[in-house]
Image (cartoon, rainbow, N blue to C red):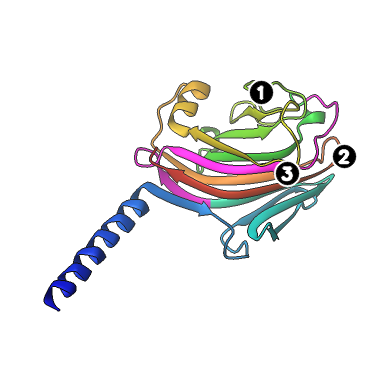
């Protein structure tokens, strides 16, 4: 009886230690398992993209539908990148946006984008963002300054027209390394993560899905 009791304590101790380690090295932004978007703020630029948690293949995920609209979901959460430098997420798009010039203001639209932000506060010129985009025409791996905020936002095409629509893709980015490469700066913290499906400039339409967004140690 005593041996069984101590075995139970040992197993419980190991379990708690593992759970604590996982918490320290795995920070969830959202898995959408709650079924709502209460932790996200909406920022509307033109109209409102419809964001809704839906069930697909028995899993809750985020669906975004844009009809000539541009609004984002923003999750304000300070992340220590020295502890968890990798941003992980999965996404899919149902369609691309045709022959638009994504480096121009008239073509600054994306079926899906995930971005990380450094908030400059009152010194807004110090704000910085990296936009990981699913491009319709730009080549995979291409980077360029945002057409509306060239000094503060950089676009990086992770997916392109060569990637299949209606298929899930898993992404993983080292945020420290990407800021070093794209801006030439060393950072420790980011202040928010945002999602956006937008088609306002080209006046098109797009449907995308997002799921399982989290930071990890490796």
Q: CA distance from mark 1 to mark 3?
A: 18 Å
| Residue mark closest to the camera, 2 vs 1 | 1
Magenta range: 76-101
Q: Which mark is residue 203?
A: 2
Q: Is residue 127 visible?
A: no
- What residue sits 56% from the left and 60% below the top? 39
Which of 3/119 is in front?
A: 3
The residue sitting at the bottom extreme is 1
Neighbour class for label 1 at 10 Å: few (<14), some, many (≥20)?
Answer: some
Q: Which mark is residue 151?
A: none
* Rendering coords of residue 154 (x, y %): 60, 28
* Rendering coords of residue 199 (x, y %): 80, 40
- Disc 2 on helix, strand or loop? loop
Residue 120 magenta-highlighted: no
- Disc 3 on helix, strand or loop? strand
User: Which residue is the site of mark 3?
Assistant: 197
* Rendering coords of residue 67 (x, y %): 84, 47
Which of 147/38 is in front?
A: 38
- What residue sits 76% from the left and 32% below the top? 108
Judge from the rendering whether residue 40 lies leftward or rightward of residue 181; answer left or right. Answer: right
Judge from the rendering whether residue 65 lies leftward or rightward of residue 141; answer left or right. Answer: right
Neighbour class for label 3 at 10 Å: few (<14), some, many (≥20)?
Answer: many
User: Which residue is the site of mark 1?
Assistant: 140
Q: Relative to 194, is 23 above or below?
A: below
- Sequence-first disc among 1 and 3: 1
| Residue mark closest to the camera, 2 vs 3 | 3
- What residue sits 73% from the left and 51% below the top? 64
């Amino acid at each position: 009886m005593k041996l069984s009791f101590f075995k139970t304590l040992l197993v419980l101790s190991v379990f708690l230690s593992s759970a604590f380690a996982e918490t320290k090295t795995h920070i969830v932004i959202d898995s959408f398992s709650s079924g709502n978007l209460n932790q996200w703020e909406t920022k509307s630029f033109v109209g409102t993209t419809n964001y809704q948690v839906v069930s697909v293949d028995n899993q809750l995920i985020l669906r975004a539908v844009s009809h000539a609209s541009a609004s984002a979901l923003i999750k304000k959460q300070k992340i220590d990148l020295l502890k968890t430098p990798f941003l992980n997420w999965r996404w899919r798009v149902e369609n691309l946006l045709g022959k638009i010039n994504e480096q121009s203001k008239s073509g600054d639209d994306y079926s899906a984008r995930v971005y990380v932000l450094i908030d400059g506060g009152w010194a807004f010129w110090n704000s910085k963002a990296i936009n990981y985009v699913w491009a319709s025409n730009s080549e995979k791996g291409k980077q360029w300054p945002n057409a509306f905020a060239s000094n503060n936002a950089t676009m990086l095409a992770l997916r392109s027209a060569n990637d299949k629509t209606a298929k899930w893709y898993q992404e993983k980015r080292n945020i420290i390394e990407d800021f070093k490469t794209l801006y030439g700066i060393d950072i420790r913290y980011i202040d928010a993560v945002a999602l956006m499906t937008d088609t306002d400039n080209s006046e098109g339409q797009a449907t995308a899905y997002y799921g399982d967004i989290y930071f990890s140690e490796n």
